[in-house]
Image (cartoon, rainbow, N blue to C red):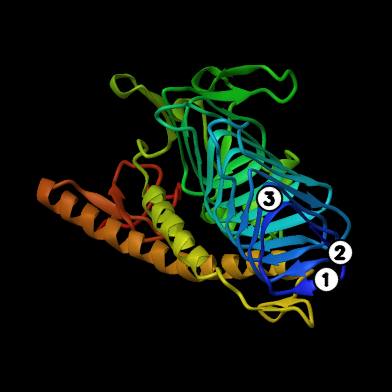
């Protein structure tokens, strides 16, 4: 079955061998095909998409938008299910993705989790506002990311990180596998802890409030190697839990109040993302949530960023006040002389040269 360009309908497409949406078609219902679903550039789908093979193409100036879950059923006697998003245009997917193999190439935004039962490959610029989970206990998988921002990464099997990777809640875990770094110039893969150039950006407060880019979640300057003013995970943030055979990349071992604020921000991000689901679609005006569908992908990201920024100030102040109370109590109980940072007011030992909270190097007045 082929839905031609300009088609606009609300009846589900189910029980067919193959289904294709030509460029510009719009369907406000489910699509299910026994063999393959093809969605071409400029299409709008509001409903779930299910098929062992799902191909989503992007191109031109109009985005491809899918508001619904993508599911690739796997049949043991057949080949692995495949979901591919590729092209030189833009795509937005608001929903959960489940398939044996998931391949994302190009400018793609996913608001939801990705479950790749065998293999996940992302070569952006891509933004995944959700967790990426790869492999299973019975069958380890393989993950490969470059030029991509994701919430968290969990893999059973090896995970390969290349240039331009950002974690929002900064943790990547590989069970029964390793976390590797792929060198951009040579293509060589090395254990993350052994690669001096290994670097993963952490989307934290400096990035959230950066005035230089419109979308700091997918920072163009970072992707182009023109910015180093960000928090990051480096080779020393890699650890191996040998008795569990688990590799972990995280900064949780660091004693920094910024980590507390970052965790609060990351949780807020998940809560905000849930509120973005199920926007109304008007086929007549080709608008989503009252916004022209051509503007919707960027508008939904900007809306999320605005909500993140609203919460950030509150979380930062909570962390600062909590830290002040804890440090004051500690110094008074131990009889240790302390001063206050002139910039943020957080207590610090009189001989400390740097504030633990804001990093201010100047001294303060004795408390």
Residue 7: mark? 1
**Mark toward the start of the polypeptide (3 vs 2):** 2
Q: Which callout, 3 or 2, points to the residue nearer the camera?
A: 2
Q: Could you say where residue 42 lies in the image, as x and y percent from the top left?
A: 82, 62
**Local secondary structure at mark 1:** loop
The answer to whether 174 appears left or right of 62 in the picture is left
Q: Could you say where residue 311 lies in the image, as x and y percent from the top left?
A: 46, 68
Front residue of this view, candidates 208 and 241 = 241
Are circles 1 and 3 on residues that touch, CB within 8 Å? no
For marks 1 and 3, give the CA distance. Answer: 36 Å
**Local secondary structure at mark 3:** loop
Crowding around mark 1 (Cα neighbors within 10 Å: few <14, some 14 to 19, many 20+) is: some
Res 197 seen here: no
Are circles 1 and 2 on residues that touch, CB within 8 Å? yes
Q: Is residue 355 above or below residue 100?
A: below
Residue assigned mark 3: 219
Q: Which callout, 1 or 3, points to the residue nearer the camera?
A: 1
């Amino acid at each position: 079955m082929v839905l031609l360009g300009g088609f606009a309908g609300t009846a589900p497409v189910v029980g067919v061998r193959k289904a294709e949406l030509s460029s510009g078609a719009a369907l406000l219902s489910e699509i299910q095909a026994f063999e393959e679903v093809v969605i071409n550039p400029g299409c709008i789908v509001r409903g779930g998409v299910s098929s062992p093979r799902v191909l989503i193409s992007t191109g031109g100036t109009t985005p491809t938008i899918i508001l619904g879950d993508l599911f690739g059923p796997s049949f043991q006697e057949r080949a692995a299910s495949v979901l591919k998003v590729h092209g030189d245009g833009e795509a937005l997917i608001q929903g959960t993705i489940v398939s044996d193999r998931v391949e994302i190439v190009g400018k793609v935004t996913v608001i939801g989790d990705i479950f790749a039962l065998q293999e996940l490959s992302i070569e952006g610029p891509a933004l995944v506002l959700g967790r990426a989970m790869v492999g299973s206990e019975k069958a380890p998988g393989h993950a490969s990311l470059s030029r991509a921002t994701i919430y968290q990464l969990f893999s059973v099997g090896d995970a390969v990180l290349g240039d331009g990777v950002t974690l929002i809640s900064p943790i990547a875990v590989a069970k029964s596998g390793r976390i590797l770094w792929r060198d951009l110039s040579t293509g060589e893969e090395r254990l993350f802890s052994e690669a001096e150039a290994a670097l993963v950006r952490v989307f934290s407060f400096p990035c959230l409030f950066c005035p230089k880019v419109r979308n700091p979640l997918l920072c163009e300057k970072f992707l182009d190697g023109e910015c180093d003013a960000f928090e990051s995970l480096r080779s020393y943030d890699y650890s191996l839990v040998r008795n569990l055979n688990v590799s972990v990349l995280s900064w949780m071992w660091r004693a920094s109040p910024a980590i507390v604020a970052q965790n609060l921000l990351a949780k807020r991000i998940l809560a905000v993302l849930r509120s973005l689901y199920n926007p109304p679609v008007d086929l007549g005006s080709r608008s989503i949530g009252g916004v022209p569908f051509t503007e919707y992908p960027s508008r939904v990201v900007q809306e999320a960023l605005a909500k993140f920024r609203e919460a950030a100030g509150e979380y930062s102040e909570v962390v600062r006040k909590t830290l002040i109370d804890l440090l004051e109590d500690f110094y008074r109980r131990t009889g240790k002389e302390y001063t206050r940072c002139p910039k943020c007011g957080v207590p610090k030992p009189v001989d400390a040269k740097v504030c633990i909270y804001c990093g201010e190097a100047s001294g303060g007045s004795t408390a």
